[in-house]
């Protein structure tokens, strides 16, 4: 007999050691997420994956799956929470989708579509965050960074380079790079780094590839992100590129 | 690069064994010496500790007491708790800036001085308070402020300033079993070591079984397990806020697998309005260390840490002296009290201005020299704490109580208090009362009793346990200080009828926005949105729409936040909104919506540039809706 | 809202700091426009000559607020329209024009009119007839209460159509996958 738990009304099998998120995705059920990535340890910071586990709020990406858990995911209360979180991320940064290269492949945007988010709702912060175009192959647009820490983790754990880190705290928390000049060009970053292929939004861009696939025909233009659960299912960590 | 700077960094790193975990301590030393962390110093620190520069800058950017840009030779930080506000700290700040020709938050052009505010410094019973180069000065009167300004202008080194400026009062007003204790250093330890198993007791059975399994003499096990049993029998619960049962925590840590264990004393005391740990560390440091050592004995740890908040920097040397004395007396170090194998050391780590580091897992991160971000739990510190090893984290007061219990036994302890809340609680009383200070009460004491004892009159509200606790109004003063009614980490802040409870909530909202670590979305963005909403209401732009917004923010923060900071950040606003709605309503506009910003002000830059001031160059507030 | 076929619903539209792209998209609903005209009559819009907005059921506003005149018009719409809809990316979050928000307005004006290349004896226009520029471009919901948002740059004709027909049918409008777009 396999171990199972209940996700809304579905029975979900899991292997011991899996999180609720991993088991759900592997079974084809989508739980919204931004800082989760199938090849990395869970981070638990974006809170999009908040679910009710036996009635208590918890992040699906960090909660270990256990036999008999009752997990609520697709309920109005959580939808409202997730909408607000997406709105907060939009309000906090500068997200002008019409001029973003990654539009259509962006997970933040895709979740916004999926959750029916029609506006940022909150006051826009309009922070001033200059872009870093110093690197020959990579453009860093901090305006779109949602602080998921995936690039930080990838650079440390896979590339062994520590190209990225966070500084500041609270609303002033921000991404920095490992160079006295503060410029990406002066770090060890290269376009082939894992860190350059994990950003869920358009903050880390590869130069000269922008519009290879036209707008309107991109990943989440065609299919809602919630119908792509299997693409995020757990897989062994690999040390090379390829988006989530 | 100057050899000075190089020597400073190399020396600081070497003193800490060049361990990466010492990063924060090293940066604090650099900051103290240079008043900031220049790029070159950051680079050198990174090199010495073998860390990426980005990590060094990340840590430097997290803690309020570290700065990568120059600060004044004299750096003055006014404590900005609501109690400091009530005592006029903002006027004093403005006056000082004026006298020193400096703008708040800016460095004076000659680099002599910088002036700003900081979160509550734990001197609420003797405010308004400030920190100068990290050292506390309480009771800042206009006269004392003048003196401070003169000393700064005369460029007199801090060492030569009049000592009386730095004298901190204890203000112990009511003593009970803890503050009246009769323990000499070592008493609790001797009692623990001497503990024998009652023949036929469950403890003896457990000791026998363990002895057989672990190859430790039954006697030694009787002593440790017996002491643990007393802590459990006392039903001691944590005094840091969450109220977890201490015996269970120690037992879980003792039973967790792993080669090393750690004992950590949480002296971060960042909750605005709390200062009892400061007094315990000033007056009963031996008892604190004794409690930690008992914990070390029970769980089998060899190393303890006292995490001392940066605001209490002035206590560092006295505390180190106490540790030295205890070492000399055989109460610390190897073979404590002559018992082979009982080895325990205590180090003191300084915090650097971050309330969130009081959260136990963030505190552990900080101990490891990192940014103070709360970890994902499970696993909990008792199994995966400091360096991922089993770790017990307890509050200062909890360790004191543990020492008493180790000496006198659990039954002795639990005869005081209520059924579900054994023993006593120290309250840090401040605000509108005649006798602010430390009051120790048996659990079960009513708020009304405390108010009477501290000389509070015409009390409108009491903030229990600080902004993360609850605000209660006059009709609730018969409620009791106890885990089953009003649990508290100790803050007891009194507001009389003259106080504007909206401003109280607004002050606390600024505190949370400033102290959010920024890890999780709801708290990072939500605390700032809440602060801005209250500022908007304060500026006269508030409407009903904003009250709905507060409600929405609360839901998001409560449901989604990663740690207690975010969960409780809306409490003061909701509590005051519920109990004192008129404090909000009289500020609201009758309209259903008003922008959060000054619309007319948004035209000011264009007016300046065009020199226009005609009617069309202005936007009035709308009259209706 | 309750929308029996008759009396017809009054609808006003305007463009603030926008590019009329959203209006073009509205016209793009093609032959469905006739169906729409069956149900609504237009008040102030760039398609009619009406200069001041009268009492309306629905107001569609394209573009963010970039200057004093935008604010006045927006307020007029809010006063007159029972339901105010922010139409398109610029109305929703400031859009392209808001990319000036990270620049300092005074620096901007100085550069453009005073110190820019070929700008001897430059002068910042100060004619009282010209609306003054706001320090930032603001999304509509930061200036007035907004009831609904239709994102997109521009929102597709299908999205606008779907939204309006649901609204006119008295339903809470929902745009599903493919109709919500931020780009
Ligand atoms: C934001 C936050 C701040 C905290 N600050 C403190 C503190 O300053 N001192 C403290 O003892 N506990 C504090 N705590 C509680 C600790 O996480 C932990 O529960 C406590 O130190 C355990 O000790 P105890 O069981 O003896 O109370 C804080 C918790 C949170 C969420
Ligand atoms: S740059 Fe991208 S991957 Fe890195 S923290 Fe920001 S959003 Fe995440
Ligand atoms: S709730 Fe606030 S303080 Fe706690 S982890 Fe989240 S951002 Fe940090
Ligand atoms: S995906 Fe779980 S918190 Fe981000």
Image (tube, rainbow, N blue to C red):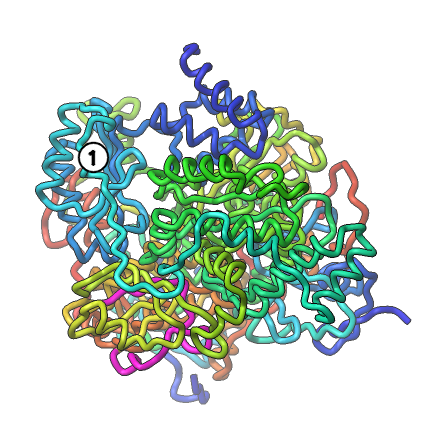
Residue at which label 1 appears? B163
Percent of width and height locating residue C47: 37, 64
Please state if B319 lies on the left or on the right of B430 as rendered: right
Q: Any magenta on residue B100?
A: no
Question: For the N terminus of chain A, which image quadrant?
Answer: bottom right
Pick the residue in front: B137 or A137. Answer: B137
Q: Is residue B476 visible?
A: yes
Residue visible at 70% across and 75% down in the picture = A70
Residue visible at 50% across and 45% down in the picture = B372
Percent of width and height locating residue A91: 44, 54
Percent of width and height locating residue C17: 35, 52
Against B267, residue A52 (above or below) is below
For label 1, count other residues whose C-alpha is less than 10 Å away and answer few (under 14), some (14-19) or many (20+): few
Mainly helix, strand or loop, the magenta region? loop
**Magenta-drawn segment:** B474-494
Against C167, residue C118 (above or below) is above
Please state if B523 lies on the left or on the right of B279 as rendered: right
Pick the residue in front: A19 or B285. Answer: B285
Please state if B270 lies on the left or on the right of B497 as rendered: right
Which quarter of the picture shows residue A128? top left
In what element is the residue under mark 1?
helix
Which quarter of the picture shows residue B191? bottom right
């Amino acid at each position: 007999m396999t171990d199972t738990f209940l996700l809304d009304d579905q029975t979900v099998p899991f292997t011991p050691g899996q999180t609720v998120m991993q088991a759900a995705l592997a079974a084809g059920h989508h739980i919204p997420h931004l800082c989760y990535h199938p090849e990395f340890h869970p981070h638990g910071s974006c809170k999009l994956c908040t679910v009710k586990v036996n009635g208590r709020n918890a992040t699906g990406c960090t909660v270990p799956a256990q036999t008999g858990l009752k997990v609520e995911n697709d309920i109005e209360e959580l939808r409202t929470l997730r909408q607000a979180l997406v709105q907060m991320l939009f309000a906090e940064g500068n997200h002008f989708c019409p001029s973003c290269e990654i539009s259509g492949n962006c997970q933040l945007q895709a979740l916004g579509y999926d959750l029916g988010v029609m506006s940022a709702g909150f006051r826009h912060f309009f922070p001033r965050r200059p872009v870093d175009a110093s690197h020959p192959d990579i453009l860093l647009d901090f305006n779109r960074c949602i602080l998921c820490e995936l690039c930080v983790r990838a650079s440390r754990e896979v590339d062994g380079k520590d190209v990225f880190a966070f500084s500041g705290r609270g609303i002033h928390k921000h991404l920095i790079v490992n160079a006295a000049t503060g410029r990406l060009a002066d770090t060890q970053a290269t376009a082939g780094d894992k860190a350059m292929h994990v950003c869920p939004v358009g903050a880390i861009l590869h130069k000269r590839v922008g519009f290879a696939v036209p707008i309107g025909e991109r990943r989440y233009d065609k299919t809602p992100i919630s119908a792509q659960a299997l693409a995020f299912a757990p897989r062994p960590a690999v040390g090379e590129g390829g988006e989530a | 690069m100057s050899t000075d700077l190089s020597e400073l960094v190399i020396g600081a790193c070497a003193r800490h064994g060049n361990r990466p975990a010492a990063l924060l301590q090293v940066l604090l030393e650099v900051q103290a010496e240079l008043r900031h962390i220049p790029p070159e110093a950051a680079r050198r620190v990174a090199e010495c500790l073998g860390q990426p520069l980005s990590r060094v800058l990340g840590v430097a950017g997290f803690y309020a007491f570290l700065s990568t840009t120059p600060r004044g030779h004299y750096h003055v930080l006014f404590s900005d708790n609501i109690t400091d506000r009530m005592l006029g700290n903002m006027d004093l700040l403005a006056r000082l800036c004026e006298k020193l020709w400096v703008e708040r938050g800016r460095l004076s052009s000659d680099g002599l001085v910088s002036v700003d505010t900081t979160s509550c410094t734990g001197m609420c019973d003797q405010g308004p308070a400030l920190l100068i180069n990290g050292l506390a000065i309480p009771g800042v009167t206009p006269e004392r402020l003048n003196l401070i300004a003169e000393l700064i202008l005369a460029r007199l080194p801090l060492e030569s300033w009049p000592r009386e400026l730095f004298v901190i009062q204890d203000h112990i007003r009511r003593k009970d079993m803890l503050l009246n204790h009769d323990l000499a250093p070592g008493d609790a330890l001797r009692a623990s070591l001497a503990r024998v198993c009652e023949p036929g007791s469950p403890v003896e059975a457990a000791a026998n079984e363990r002895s057989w399994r672990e190859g430790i003499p039954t006697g030694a096990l009787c002593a440790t397990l017996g002491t643990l049993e007393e802590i459990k029998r006392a039903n001691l619960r944590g005094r840091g806020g969450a109220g977890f049962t201490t015996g269970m925590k120690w037992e879980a840590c003792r039973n967790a697998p792993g080669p090393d264990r750690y004992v950590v004393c949480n002296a971060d005391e960042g909750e605005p309005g709390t200062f009892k740990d400061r007094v315990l560390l000033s007056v009963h440091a031996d008892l604190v260390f004794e409690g930690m050592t008992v914990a070390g004995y029970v769980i089998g740890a060899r190393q303890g840490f006292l995490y001392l908040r940066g605001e209490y920097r002035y206590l560092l040397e006295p505390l180190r002296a106490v540790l030295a004395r205890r070492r000399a007396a055989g109460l610390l170090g190897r073979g404590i009290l002559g018992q082979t194998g009982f080895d325990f050391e205590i180090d003191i780590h300084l915090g650097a201005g971050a309330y969130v580091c009081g959260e136990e897992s963030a505190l552990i991160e900080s101990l490891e020299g990192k940014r103070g971000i709360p970890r994902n739990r499970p696993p909990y510190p008792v199994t995966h704490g400091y360096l991922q090893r089993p770790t017990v984290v307890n509050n200062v007061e909890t360790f004191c109580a543990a020492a008493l219990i180790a000496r006198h036994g659990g039954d002795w302890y639990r005869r005081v208090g209520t059924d579900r809340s054994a023993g006593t609680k120290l309250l840090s009383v401040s605000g509108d009362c005649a006798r602010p200070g430390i009051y120790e009460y048996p659990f079960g004491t009513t708020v009304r009793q405390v108010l009477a004892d501290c000389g509070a009159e015409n009390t409108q509200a009491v903030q229990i346990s600080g902004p993360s606790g609850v605000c209660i109004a006059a009709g609730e003063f018969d409620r009791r200080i106890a885990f089953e009614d009003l649990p508290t980490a100790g803050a007891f802040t009194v507001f009389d009828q003259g106080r504007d409870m909206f401003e109280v909530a607004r002050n606390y909202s600024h505190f949370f926005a400033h102290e959010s670590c920024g890890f999780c979305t709801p708290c990072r963005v939500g605390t700032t949105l809440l602060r801005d909403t209250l500022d908007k209401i304060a500026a006269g732009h508030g409407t009903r729409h904003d009250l709905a917004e507060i409600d929405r923010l609360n839901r998001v923060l409560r449901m989604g936040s990663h740690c207690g900071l975010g969960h409780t950040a809306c409490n003061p606003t909701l509590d005051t909104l519920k109990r004192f709605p008129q404090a909000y309503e009289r500020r609201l506009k009758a309209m259903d919506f008003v922008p959060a910003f000054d619309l007319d002000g948004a035209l000011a830059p264009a007016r300046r540039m065009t020199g226009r001031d005609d009617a069309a160059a202005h936007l009035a507030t709308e009259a209706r809706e | 809202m309750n929308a029996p076929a008759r009396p017809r619903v009054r609808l006003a539209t305007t463009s603030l700091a926008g590019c009329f792209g959203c209006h073009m998209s509205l016209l793009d609903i093609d032959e469905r426009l006739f169906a729409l005209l069956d149900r609504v009559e237009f008040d102030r819009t760039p398609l009619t000559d009406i200069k001041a907005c009268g009492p309306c059921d629905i107001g569609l506003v394209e573009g963010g607020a970039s200057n004093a005149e935008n604010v006045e018009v927006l307020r007029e719409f809010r006063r007159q329209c029972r339901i105010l809809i922010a139409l398109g990316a610029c109305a929703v979050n400031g859009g392209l024009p808001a990319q000036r928000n990270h620049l300092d307005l005074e620096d901007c004006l100085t550069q453009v009119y005073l110190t820019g290349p070929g700008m001897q004896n430059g002068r910042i226009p100060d004619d009282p007839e010209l609306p003054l520029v706001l320090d930032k471009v603001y999304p509509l919901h930061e200036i007035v209460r907004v009831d609904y948002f239709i994102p997109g740059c521009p929102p597709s004709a299908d999205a606008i159509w779907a939204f309006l027909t649901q609204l006119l049918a008295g339903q809470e409008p929902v745009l599903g996958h493919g109709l919500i777009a931020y780009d």
